[in-house]
Structure formats: C-alpha cells, structure tokens
Amino acid sequence: MAPLAPKTGDAVFASIDHVNAELFTLTYGAMVRQLLTDLEEVEEVNKQLDQMYVGYNIGVRLIDEFLAKSNVSRCVDFKETADVIAKVGFKMFLGVTASVTNWDAEGTSFSLVLEDNPLVDFVELPDTFQGLHYCNILSGVIRGALEMVSMKTEVTWVRDMLHGDDAYELRVKLLKQIPEEYPYKDDE
C-alpha cells in the first residue's frame, strides 16, 4: 500500500469535526477574562496564556492530532515547517491560513501574518489592558508543537489588530534543533 499523500489545509479542515466558532471564541474570551480577574497583572496573563497555563500545553498535545490527521511527514527544513504551519496547521485548527514573510538571512526566523483571526471576534480591549496579548495562546501552541518535533523556538507578537495594527503578525525564531533521544538501545 502506497503511503498516504499529505492533505492540504482545506482537505484536513473539511474532514474533521468542528466546534461552533462563536462558542469557541466566547469560551476563550471567558478564560482570558478569568485570568485577568485572578492574576490582575497583564504581563502575568500574557505569560500564562503562552507558557504554563494554556498555549504551550495545548501545542504539545495538538501536534499528535495534527500529524495523525494531516499525513504530513517530517519537514526537510525550517522553511517547509513554516509553510506547513501557515497553510495546514492554521487551516486545520482555526479555519484560516497565514502568510509566511520576512525571512532572515540565515533562514532561522520568519513572520506568520494573519489577515483574519477567529479568536478576536467580539473582542475590544479597554485602555487598561492595552499591554495584553489577547491571542498569546497561539504563540504558546506553536512553540509547544514545534518543541515536540525537535525545534526549540521563540514566538512573539509583532503586530496585533486589537492594538490598532493592520494585521496579526507572529515572529517565529528557531533557537536550536533538539537532537532526538531514544530511551534505550535495541541492540543490547
């Protein structure tokens, strides 16, 4: 039997079960609001959305579903990884695609630009929360997923339409390739 061909983002999106977009958006908003109430500090909420609380942990788990349902094999380089994230990953889980732009000369850093972001439907940030990176969960998800496929990255927000910018832009920087480690040797 021939190996399955990788699916496009549209094909994967069409073949999986969906949650009502408004329910998802409102639930996410309620979670962010609860974090703001509990933690009181915007920077701490940003950290929790990205690292410990939500984003990173979701990314660690989503990569398994992504690899199982998309039939994507190991990417040959970081540029291919960027394209797969933008065209398949974002489409599969959010129903949108991103553009890959602004590569650095070494090919270790790029930007993901989203024209549309379903997480921000119904959202307006009050002046007191202007430092909030409302969608910081996305940076954590990307970081967690890439770490599970042996890529240590740093993901930061560059532009955010909730702060008056013209698009949503995430900067992804490859810090290092993590060598794969096996728990034991089969030879012995």
Image (tube, rainbow, N blue to C red):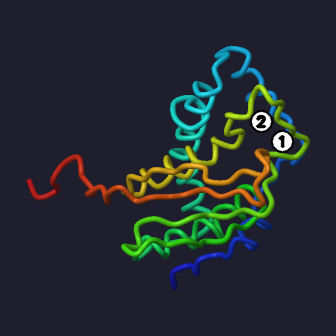
Residue 108 appears in view? yes
Dot 1 surroundings within 10 Å: few (below 14), some, or many (20 or more)?
A: some
Picture quadrant where residue 149 is located = bottom left
The residue where tag 1 is placed is 25
Q: Is residue 7 above or below residue 116?
A: below
Whole-angstrom CA distance, mark 1 to mark 2, is 5 Å
Residue at horizontal 55 percent and vertical 47 percent from the top? 59
Give the camera-side residue of 109 and 138.
Answer: 109
State left or right for residue 174 relative to residue 178.
right
Residue 74 appears in view? no
Q: Are marks 1 and 2 in contact (CB under 8 Å)?
A: yes
Give the camera-side residue of 155 and 61.
Answer: 155
SS category of the residue bearing label 2: helix
Q: Position of residue 116 (x, y in %)?
A: 80, 60
Dot 2 surroundings within 10 Å: few (below 14), some, or many (20 or more)?
A: some
Mark 1 belongs to which amino acid? Thr
* Residue lying farthest to the bottom in this orientation: 2
Mark 2 belongs to which amino acid? Tyr
* Picture disc at residue 118: none
SS category of the residue bearing label 1: helix
Give the camera-side residue of 59 and 37.
Answer: 37
Q: Position of residue 173 (x, y in %)?
A: 44, 58
Residue at horizontal 53 percent and vertical 53 percent from the top? 64
Q: Is residue 47 above or below residue 104?
A: above
State left or right for residue 125 relative to residue 75.
right
Q: Position of residue 47 (x, y in %)?
A: 55, 31
The residue where tag 2 is placed is 28
* Residue lying farthest to the left in this orientation: 188
Residue at horizontal 79 percent and vertical 50 percent from the top? 164
